[in-house]
Every structure is written in structure tokens, then in C-alpha cells.
Image: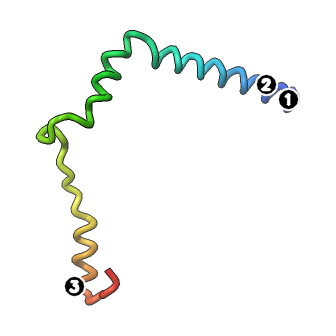
Amino acid sequence: MDTGTFRGIITGILIIAFIGLTLWAYSSRRKKDFDEAKNLPFADEDDAPVNRDTSASRETDSRHDRGDKNT
């Protein structure tokens, strides 16, 4: 099998995958899920998860404690 045949097979697989993904995305069974996803930015703020990551603030505090003025 030479390089041209291999590239042709890969191209064919990618075209089939693209067509399959397109059909999946535009199928009527997925409409409800996509409609719900497109309204997520407008969801109530109380439902949004709270970011409890404090690693960035601890790093700033530790620099300040060491006297590092380059913060």
C-alpha cells in the first residue's frame, strides 16, 4: 500500500465521519438538547456552580508574606 492509497482511505473515513456528525447534529431527536444548551447562558445565576478554587488567592498571599513586590 503506497502513501497515496493510505491518504485516500483516510480522506474517505474523514468524509464519512463528517457526514455522520452533520446528520447527528441536525437530526430532529437532538433539537430538544440543543435548544436547552443554547439557553444556558441565560439561566438563573442561583443555579450556576460556585467556584471555590482559592489557589490563586493563596499564591498572591504567599508572595505578599515573603515581601515580593512583583505581584
Residue neighbourhood size for the residue with mark 3, other residues' Cα within 10 Å, grouped as few (<14), some (14–19), many (≥20)? few
Q: Give the structural element (helix, strand or loop) at label 1.
A: helix
Q: Give the structural element (helix, strand or loop) at label 2.
A: helix
Q: Is the residue under label 2 in contact with that under label 1 (CB below 8 Å)?
A: yes
Query: In the rendered view, would you say 39 is above or below 15?
Result: below
Q: Which amino acid type corresponds to the residue marked 3 in the rendered image?
A: Asp
Q: Quadrant location of the N terminus?
A: top right
Query: In the rendered view, would you say 63 is above or below 22?
Result: below
Q: Which amino acid type corresponds to the residue marked 2 in the rendered image?
A: Gly
Q: x and y percent of residue 40 in the render?
A: 26, 33
Query: In the rendered view, would you say 42 is above or below 25?
Result: below
Compare residues 3 and 35 and report the one nearer the observer: 35
Q: Which amino acid type corresponds to the residue marked 1 in the rendered image?
A: Gly
Left of 57 or right of it: where is 11?
right
Instruction: Report which residue position mark 1 lands on.
Output: 4
Along the polypeptide, which appears first: circle 1 or circle 3?
Answer: 1
Left of 32 or right of it: where is 25?
right
Task: Please give the name of the residue rendered at 38% of the width and 16% of the height, measured from the top-left corner.
Answer: 30
Along the polypeptide, which appears first: circle 3 or circle 2?
Answer: 2
Q: Quadrant of residue 61?
A: bottom left
Task: Please give the name of the residue rendered at 26% of the width and 75% of the height, measured from the top-left corner.
Answer: 60
The CA span between labels 3 and 2 is 61 Å
The CA span between labels 1 and 2 is 6 Å
Instruction: Report which residue position mark 3 lands on.
Output: 65
Q: Which residue sits furthest top?
A: 28
Q: Give the structural element (helix, strand or loop) at label 3.
A: helix
Instruction: Report which residue position mark 2 lands on.
Output: 8
Q: Quadrant location of the C terminus?
A: bottom left
Residue neighbourhood size for the residue with mark 1, other residues' Cα within 10 Å, grouped as few (<14), some (14–19), many (≥20)? few
